Image (cartoon, helix red, strand yellow):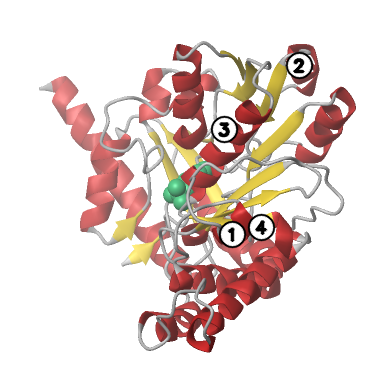
């Protein structure tokens, strides 16, 4: 199998798994228990918190572990709304992950007003539009750092400065950015940042929310005093340990993202553009994650091509995993102004540090052949 879908999820790093196993076997103490068996688990969680904080360059007390990126996203927005109930306006964009968009839609049906910022044909927002959209009653601005479908990077530093100067809270969904591009929260005035374990070689079902120490926070899960009283629920010790270990490794390997991983992506992208006619890159050419390429391939149906590639051992994606299976064209590509046909003829390949040069070589043999086969099949249908 050639796994080119690292934006959907990643393999657990074997080192991460090894770090987790003791907490699934013998070290099952409750981190809140007063005896040493429990305290060992609590200590492991403290360490995981430090590892995540080190990756983001923030304080460990600013990290709340959650069950996933979606929970982190939901918690940040809910906290902002609960803390300042008079503010009934939110700003986000049309290309966010469903963890933000569906929540925003829900809030819009519940009496909130939501501004969905547009993007241009390269998937980029206009910061002047953000400036104009901010109001006195804007509770929070939520804009993603990196887009999961196209890899496009929003100018978060500039966005943070605008929100700061206007006194509006800023949340960023950085699930795709963390571990792929350097993030330094000491230099970027953000109130909330979401990340997810399974996008950085930790297991599924663990995430983290950064909450700036000066930002007031209201828990989303109300219960026990876990997570410095910021999230109720007995900690998933093994997964938290895994998330911490994955963050530590990400900090050590992040340079590879811009070198090896970028080289894999570029070789596949350039190779496909050379071998196939009528292929275009979706998304900004430079302001983009180093691991992602999203290609509009004229004359193909991405769901069909996906199945064909699956039979030949390649995993990639048409749209996002979260909307896969639905007949809707990608909301991200549609927001970029592309036709339904272009959106439905687009494929995403996303790399990670476990890919090999051989993966790219094989993909450059398999994908063009599959595309040509599909194109000739659909031409066959037309003439018959
Ligand atoms: C994967 C993803 C999420 C959701 O994270 P989960 O841990 O799967 O809930 C949110 N935002 C973006 C941009 C993502 O890519």
Residue 364 x/y as whole percent: 42, 58
At x 37% / y 49%, what residue is drawn? Answer: 368
Q: Are marks 3 and 4 in contact (CB under 8 Å)?
A: no
At x 81% / y 35%, what residue is drawn? Answer: 160
Earlier sequence position, callout 4 versus callout 2: 4
Local secondary structure at mark 4:
strand
Q: Are marks 4 and 2 in contact (CB under 8 Å)?
A: no
Outermost front residue:
34
Could you tell me how far apart the alpha carbons at marks 4 and 1 are, in whole angstroms?
8 Å
Local secondary structure at mark 3:
helix
Q: Are marks 1 and 2 in contact (CB under 8 Å)?
A: no
Local secondary structure at mark 1:
helix
Left or right of residue 19: residue 249: right
Could you tell me how far apart the alpha carbons at marks 3 and 1 are, in whole angstroms?
17 Å
Local secondary structure at mark 2:
loop
Earlier sequence position, callout 1 versus callout 2: 2
Image quadrant in which the C terminus is located? top left
Ligand 1 within 8 Å of disc 4? The answer is: no
**Which of the labelled discs sits on residue 227, or is there none?**
1
At x 74% / y 31%, what residue is drawn? Answer: 169
* Label 1: how many Cα within 10 Å (few below 14, some 14–19, many 20+): some
Earlier sequence position, callout 4 versus callout 1: 4
Earlier sequence position, callout 3 versus callout 1: 3
Left or right of residue 180: residue 129: right
Could you tell me how far apart the alpha carbons at marks 1 and 2 are, in whole angstroms?
32 Å
Left or right of residue 328: residue 112: right
Image quadrant in which the N terminus is located? bottom left
Q: Are marks 4 and 1 in contact (CB under 8 Å)?
A: no
Tell me the residue that label 3 is attached to.
78
């Amino acid at each position: 199998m050639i796994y080119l879908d690292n934006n959907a999820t990643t393999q657990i790093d074997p080192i991460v798994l090894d770090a987790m196993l003791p907490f699934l076997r013998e070290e099952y103490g409750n981190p809140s228990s007063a005896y040493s068996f429990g305290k060992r688990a609590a200590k492991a969680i403290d360490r995981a918190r430090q590892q995540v904080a080190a990756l983001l360059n923030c304080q460990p007390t600013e990290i709340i572990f959650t069950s996933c990126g979606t929970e982190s996203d939901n918690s940040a927005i809910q906290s902002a709304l609960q803390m300042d109930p008079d503010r009934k306006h939110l700003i986000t964009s049309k290309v966010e992950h469903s963890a933000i968009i569906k929540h925003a839609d829900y809030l819009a049906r519940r009496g909130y007003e939501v501004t969905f910022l547009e993007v241009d044909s390269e998937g980029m927002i206009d910061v002047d539009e953000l400036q104009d959209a901010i109001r006195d009653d804007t509770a929070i601005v939520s804009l993603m750092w990196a887009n999961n479908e196209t890899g496009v990077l929003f100018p978060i530093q500039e966005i943070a400065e605008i929100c700061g100067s206007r006194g509006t809270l800023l949340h960023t969904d950085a699930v795709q950015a963390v571990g792929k591009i350097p993030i330094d929260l000491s230099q970027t005035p953000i109130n909330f940042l979401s990340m997810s374990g399974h996008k950085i070689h930790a297991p599924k079902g663990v995430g983290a929310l950064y909450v700036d120490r000066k930002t007031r926070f209201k828990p989303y899960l109300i219960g026990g005093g876990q997570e410095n009283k910021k999230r109720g629920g007995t900690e998933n010790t093994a997964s938290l340990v895994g998330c911490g270990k994955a963050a530590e490794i990400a900090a050590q390997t992040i340079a590879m993202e811009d070198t090896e991983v970028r080289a894999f992506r570029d070789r596949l992208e350039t190779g496909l553009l050379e071998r196939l006619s009528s292929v275009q890159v979706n998304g900004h050419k430079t302001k983009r994650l180093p691991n992602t390429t999203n290609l509009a391939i004229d004359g193909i149906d991405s769901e069909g091509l996906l199945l064909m590639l699956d039979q030949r051992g390649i995993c990639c994606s048409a749209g996002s995993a979260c909307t896969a299976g639905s007949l809707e064209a990608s909301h991200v590509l549609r927001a970029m102004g592309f036709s339904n046909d272009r959106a439905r003829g687009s494929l995403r390949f996303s790399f990670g540090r476990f890919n090999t040069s051989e993966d790219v070589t094989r993909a450059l043999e398999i994908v063009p052949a599959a595309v040509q086969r599909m194109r000739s099949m659909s031409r066959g249908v037309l003439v018959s």
